[in-house]
Structure formats: structure tokens, C-alpha cells
Amino acid sequence: MMIELQDVCFAYDGVPALRHVTATVEKGETVALLGPNGAGKSTLLRLLNGLVFPEIGCYRFEGEEITARRLREHRYAKWFHQRVGFVWQNPAAQLFCASVREELAFGPEQMGLPADEVRRHVDDALALCGIAHLAERAPYTLSGGEQKRTAIAAILTMNPAVWTLDEPLASLDEAGAAWLTDFLRALKRAGKTVIFSTHDTALADALAGVRWQFTPAREVRVER
């Protein structure tokens, strides 16, 4: 079992965001998170990435319970964040380096890879995401679609086993949406585990084998 949630509850300042969520994700599954705004989809993605933690219940990744204490262990946190990648809805929120190339190099450098291997990872990701011509640009100067590709390329350099994406088609034009849909199909073919939130039922129909339907009451119904 790659991901296991058991009776997970979480609240912001006493306001429930997730209520008694129990679900599992197998290796290689593609899961669409569906439901209205404010139903807890983004919160769940944050929880899966170790940015927030269950107040009640348990989240296990590959059999290990993910807690704030566990992620304070530097070696484990480094391993976990290499295994699970997160593409935010607003990519500008996760881009902070002076250039696209530096942005893509940051993760592999934190992993301690040799300089030549870091360079190879970066060059491969630039090519695969079609942004080699942007390598020396500052991320804040890019369009929304270019920032999205840069954020994806930065995760790609880490080669995570699990990809989590919050509203991946948000703010993309038709060409950008088509490229990203094809990219997600390629991840699926490569055997990656993909979990994404969306309001686009066509994207869910095209990609997902499993749906987690979020209700306004912040509960989740799993449909396989």
C-alpha cells in the first residue's frame, strides 16, 4: 500500500476541513479529487505532502506514519519530499530562485547529487517540458503557463514516485492544457502514482481510474 488514510480529520482554527477520511492509494494509481470549492481537496493534498498533519486519525506513506515529529528528522524528510512531489495551483507560490535553471537545480542539489548529474537532470527536464529557451529567465518574468511548466520541471528533476497536483489546468490556455494532459498521461504510462484535484470532469474521465468525491460536509466518497 503506497498511501493509507485512516479516519483523518483536520480543521483550521476549529473549522473542519476534512472529516473522517478513510481511503487508500495503490502504487501506480491515478486518483482525481472532485468536489466543490472549500470541500477540502487542497487541504488533503497539503496533508499528503506533509505540510499539515491529521488532528485525528493517521496518514501512512509506504507503511510509515507521517507526523510533524517524523518530518523533523532531516534524513527522513529529505527522502519523503523526494518521493512525493507537489505542483501548486498557483506555481508562482513555489518558485523562488533567480533563474529557471537554478529553480530546477535546487532539488537535486539538496539531494546531494554531483554537479554533472544535477546538470543532466536539469537539461533533461528543460527539454521534456519545452522550456530550454527560458533557462536563464527569472521565474517572476514568465507567463502563467510558463511558470506552470517550470514548476512541473522542478518536480521532474526529483523524479518522485508520487505526483500531486492542485487544479493542474488552472489558468492554462487550450494548448497548455493539452500539453499538461499529455504529460500526465506519460506519468501514468511510466507507472507513477498521480493524485490531482480538478473541477474538469473531462480531465478526470481521461486520466483517473479512481475518484475521491468530496462533499460540502468535507467528507470523501471513494469511487473505483
Image (cartoon, grey):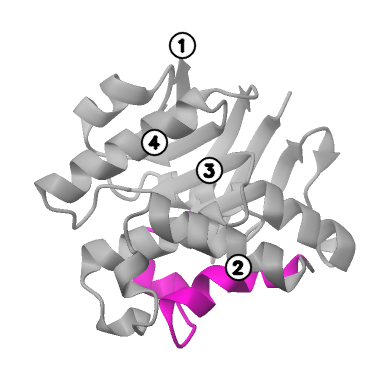
Mark 2 crowd level (few <14, some 14–19, many ≥20, 10 Å Cα) = some
Label 3: which secondary element: strand
Mark 4–mark 3 contact, CB under 8 Å? yes
**Residue 3, horizontal then vertical, whole percent:** 68, 32
Q: Give the mark nearest the N terminus, 4 or 2.
A: 2
Question: What is the number of callouts on the image?
Answer: 4
User: Gap in Å between the C-alphas at discs 2 and 1?
Assistant: 41 Å
**On residue 18, which mark appears?**
none
**Which residue position holds label 2?**
119
Residue shown at 34% from the left, 50% from the top? 38
**On residue 224, which mark appears?**
1
The magenta segment: 87-111
User: Gap in Å between the C-alphas at discs 4 and 3?
Assistant: 9 Å
Residue type (three-letter) at the residue carrying disc 2 = Arg
User: Gap in Å between the C-alphas at discs 2 and 3?
Assistant: 22 Å
Mark 2–mark 3 contact, CB under 8 Å? no
* Residue 85 located left or right of residue 39: right
* Residue 128 located left or right of residue 133: right
Mark 3 crowd level (few <14, some 14–19, many ≥20, 10 Å Cα) = many
Residue type (three-letter) at the residue carrying disc 4 = Leu
Asked if residue 96 is positioned above or below residue 119 in the image, the reply reads below
Mark 4 crowd level (few <14, some 14–19, many ≥20, 10 Å Cα) = some
**Which residue position holds label 3?**
163
Q: Give the mark nearest the N terminus, 2 or 3.
A: 2
* Residue 183 located left or right of residue 74: left
Residue shown at 36% from the left, 66% from the top? 132
Task: Say if the magenta span includes residue 135.
Answer: no
Frontmost of labels 1 and 3 is: 3
Label 1: which secondary element: loop
**On residue 184, which mark appears?**
4
Q: Give the mark nearest the N terminus, 1 or 3.
A: 3
